[in-house]
Image: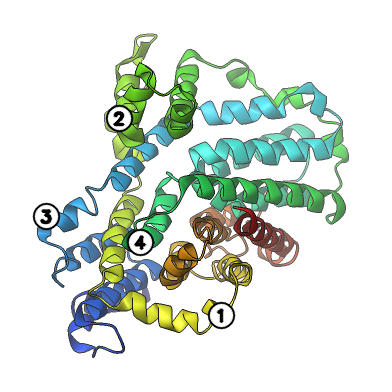
Amino acid sequence: MTRVNRKHIIVSILGVFFMFGFGYVCPTWGSVTRMGVQYLGILIGWIVMCAFGIPMSMASVMSIAACALPGYYTAATVITGSIGSSFTVQALFIFVLVYVFEESGTGEFLVRWILSRRFINGRPYLFTACFLFAIIVIGSCIGSFGALMITITVLENVAAVTGMKKQDDWIRFLLISVVGLSGITEIMYPFKPYAELYSGIFNSTLASIGTSVSGATYLTTSITIAVISFVLLVFVARFVFKFDLAKIKALDVTTLQTEEFKRIKPNQIVILIAIVISFFHPFIVMLLPKGSFVHGFLNDMGQALFMALVIAVLSLIRIGGKPIMNPAVAFAKGVNWNVIFAVGSVLVVGGGISAEGSGVTTWLLDIFSGTLGKMGPIPVIIIVSLLGCFITQFFSNASTAIILLTALAPMATVMYQNGVNVSVFVAVIGIGTLSACLLPCGSGQSAIMFGTDMFNDSDGQRWALSKGLIVAVTLAIAVMLAGILCISVL
C-alpha cells in the first residue's frame, strides 16, 4: 500500500468517525448538548477531510447527509437549507458567468488594453501600478485563478518582448503579488462563492438576533483592503525592492496589444455588459427610481434569478451564427462543485451548531469572553488578521478561515448588540486567509506559481521565503490597517 493511499484511508476513516460516531461517544460538557456535540463532530470531520486531501465536494456531501441525523433538520430541510439555498444557487450562476467572461478572452483584452496605453511608455513604476490595478479590477470579476493565468501570459509576453529573464526580481514580484492578492480577486464582492461560504458561518449565528452580514459593509471593507494593498505594494516596489527596470523603461507598451487584442469583439462587448449588470445588480437597483417598472422588475427578481436570466439570454443571442455561450459546456466546465457543496455544507452545519438547542454558542461565548471578549474590536481585528494571513501560508485557506470565523461567530452576536459592525470581520478573515504565496502547499494559486518558469528553479523557493516574504508582510499589514479603519468608522 502506497503512502498516499494509506493517508487517504486514515483521513477518510477519521472524517467518517467524527461525522457519524463522535457525537454519540463523546460526553457532553458545559452548556453543550448531545445535539451540539454531534454538530461539532460533523464540523471537525469536514475540516479534517478538506484539510488533508479529501475532495471538498465529497466531504461536504457527507457532512450534509450527517446533518439530518441529530434531529434538528429533516431530510427535506437539510437539502433546501444547503444545496437548495439561494446562496448556493447564486454561487453556481456566478461560476458560469465568470467562465464565459474568461473563456471569451474579455478579461485578458481589458488587461492588455490598460497596459498598452502610450502614457505608460518610459515610466516603469507607472507600468507596475497599472499592472496591479488592472489585475485587481479584472480579477475581482474573473477570480483569482483567471487573474493568475492572465498574469502569467502577460508577463511571459513582456519578458519575450523586452529580453528580460523570467526569473527577474520585477517579474517575480508582480507574479507573487498577484498570488498574494488572491483574496481580493476571489472574494471582493459579498456575493462571490467563497464570500458566501464565509458569510454563512456568521449568518447562521447572527440569525438568532434577526440580522445578517451586511453586504455593503463587506464590500466597503474589501475595497479598502484592495486600495491599501495596492498603495503599499506600489510603495514597496518603488522604495524597498531595487529593481533593474531599464528594459521596461525602453518597452513600447503598444506591443502588448497584439493583433488578437487590438479591438474588442462584439461577443466580448455583450459579455462585458452582462457581467457588469449581473455583478452590480444590487447597486443598479439602488440607483433606479423607486416605483419605476425597471426598479420593480429587477428588485422583485433578485440577483440570483437575474443571473439565471442573463445566462439564458447569452445562450440565445447569436453573433456570426454562433451563440455567445454554450450553456452545457459552461455548466460542465465552469462550475466548481467543491465550492458549491462547501457553501451548502457550511450553511446547514453552521445552522445546527448555532441552534439554541445545541448549546455550542453559549459555550464558545464563555470561552472567548474570557480572552478576546475582554478586548475591544480593534485588538481582535489585529489578532485575527495577522493569524489569518500567516497561518494560511502553511495550512488550508478555507479551513483557516472557517476555524477563525467559527470561533468568532458567538462573539459576533454580542459585539453586534454593542454597536460593532461585525461584517468587517468576515471580509478581513476571508481575504486574509486567501493571501498564501510563500509555499507551494499554501494554495492552488501558489502551487501554480511555483510551477512556472519564473519560480521553477533552484532559486525560486528561496526567493519567495526571502524577498517574497516582504510581499506577504505588506499584504498582512494592508489587511490589518483596513480592518482597523473599517471597524472604527463603519
Residue drawn at x 32%, y 46% as measured from the top left: 87
Estimate the spatial distance between the alpha carbons at disc 1 and disc 3, rounded to whole Å.
41 Å
**Badge 4 vs badge 1, beta-carbon distance below 8 Å:** no
Q: Nearer the viewer, residue 87 or 20?
A: 87
- Say which quarter of the image contains residue 469: bottom right
Query: From the viewer's perspective, is residue 159 above or below residue 425?
Result: above
Distance, label 2 to label 4, CA atoms, is 27 Å
Estimate how packed mark 1 is, as few (under 14), some (14 to 19) or many (20 or more) residues with alpha carbons within 10 Å. Answer: few
Label 1 residue SS:
helix
**Residue 294: % across, % down:** 37, 19
**Residue type, numbered disc 3:** Ala
First of labels 4, 1 by sequence position: 4
**As shown in the figure, which amino acid type bears the numbered disc 2?**
Met
Image location (x, y in percent) of residue 26: 24, 88
- What is the quadrant of residue 293 in the picture? top left
Give the mark, 2 or 1, whose residue is nearer the N terminus: 2
Hey, what amino acid is under mark 1?
Lys
Q: Secondary structure at mark 3?
A: helix
Q: Mark 3 highlights which residue?
A: 76
Residue 209 circle label = 4
Q: Which mark is residue 301?
A: 2
Q: Position of residue 318 (x, y in %)?
A: 35, 12
In-image side of 281 versus 132 (left or right): left
Report how far apart the C-alphas of labels 4 and 1 lie in the structure.
Answer: 22 Å
| Left-right relation of 424 to 302 | right
Q: Is residue 7 visible?
A: no
Secondary structure under the numbered disc 4 in the rendered image: helix
Left or right, residue 152 beside residue 353: right
The residue closer to the viewer here, 132 or 380, is 380
Which residue bears the numbered disc 1? 374
